[in-house]
Image: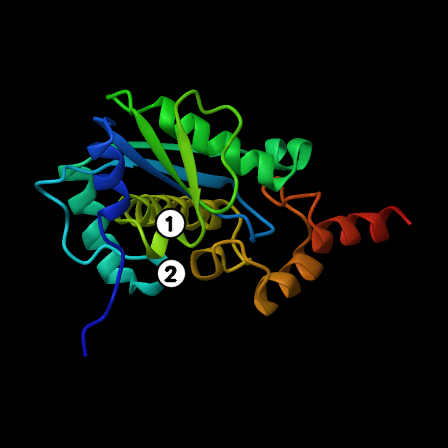
């Protein structure tokens, strides 16, 4: 049985229309109640695309780590974040788009066209862009971006767990698992928890009440 994964057809289509550099952009971290949202922007080398690119959620940790290293070696990469404060101030969608815009701005090559995972294009992107629903499972550039963003953010959460032990962030990456919510009740809210997200907001509201 042949597994069907993302391909380079979206990129080639735009390159055939005159876009010299096509960037894939994706973000990770909309659902967690703690930590930043992280975005990656990737321009793949059409002649040297790492084998096995796919939606980061479909890959094992070991395979993500291997592909992460290969992408950094072979592609043009930009990675950026939006902080917990920015998430709370702007809302998670706008903060995600801000991280995407920042990641794109950090590329060493100016892209001609952007492929965005999702159904909305960030308003701050200054280049022609198209949103692709489930893009991380359809475009190799977006899949690469999902891998880089996921591995980068997971490492941030592992580091944060060293500073704030007890929340199991190395395993849950800030998502509201049973263990994380129990720790939130028992230990309390940290500076890295998103106060605009319901479980954290409700806890702070109850404390004030």
- What colour scheme has been applied to the protein in the rendered image? rainbow
User: Going by the image, does 129 lie left or right of 111?
Assistant: right
| Residue 209: % across, % down | 91, 50
**Residue lying at 59% horizontally and 40% vertically, measured from the top left:** 93
Categorize mark 2 by other alpha carbons within 10 Å: few (<14), some (14-19), many (20+).
some
User: Going by the image, does 58 lie left or right of 124?
Assistant: left
User: Is 101 in front, or is 123?
Assistant: 123
Residue, far left: 47
| Residue 98: % across, % down | 51, 30
Q: In which quarter of the image is residue 106?
A: top left
| Residue 44: % across, % down | 20, 38
**Residue lying at 48% horizontally and 60% vertically, measured from the top left:** 172
**Residue lying at 13% horizontally and 40% vertically, measured from the top left:** 46
User: Is 75 in front, or is 194?
Assistant: 75
Residue, far bottom: 1
Q: Viewer-nearest of labels 2 and 1?
A: 2
**Residue 40 against residue 166 in the figure, above or below:** above
**Residue 2 against residue 98 in the figure, above or below:** below
Circle 1 SS class: helix
For marks 2 and 1, the one nearer the N-term is 2
Q: Please identify the quadrant where the N terminus is shown.
A: bottom left
Q: How many labels does the image show?
A: 2
Q: Distance between the residues labelled 2 and 1?
A: 9 Å
Disc 1 target residue: 150
Circle 2 SS class: helix
Residue, far front: 17
Disc 2 target residue: 57
User: Going by the image, does 87 lie left or right of 81?
Assistant: right
């Amino acid at each position: 049985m042949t597994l069907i994964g993302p391909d380079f057809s979206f990129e080639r289509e735009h390159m055939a229309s005159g876009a010299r550099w096509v960037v894939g952009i994706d973000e990770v971290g909309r659902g967690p109640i703690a930590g930043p949202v992280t975005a990656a922007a990737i321009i793949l080398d059409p002649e040297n695309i790492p084998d096995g690119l796919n939606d980061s959620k479909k890959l094992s940790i070991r395979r993500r780590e291997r592909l992460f290293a290969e992408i950094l070696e072979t592609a043009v990469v930009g990675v950026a974040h939006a902080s917990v404060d920015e998430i709370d101030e702007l809302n998670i969608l706008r903060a995600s788009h801000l991280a995407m815009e920042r990641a794109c701005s950090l590329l060493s090559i100016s892209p001609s066209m952007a492929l965005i995972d999702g159904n909305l294009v960030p308003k701050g992107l200054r280049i022609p862009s198209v949103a692709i629903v489930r893009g991380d499972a359809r475009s190799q550039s977006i899949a690469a971006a999902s891998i880089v963003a996921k591995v980068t953010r997971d490492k941030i959460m592992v580091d944060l767990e060293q500073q704030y032990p007890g929340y199991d962030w190395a395993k849950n990456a800030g998502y509201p698992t049973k263990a994380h919510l129990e720790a939130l009740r028992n230990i309390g809210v940290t500076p890295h928890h998103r106060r605009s997200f319901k479980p954290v907001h409700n806890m702070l509201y109850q404390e004030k009440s």
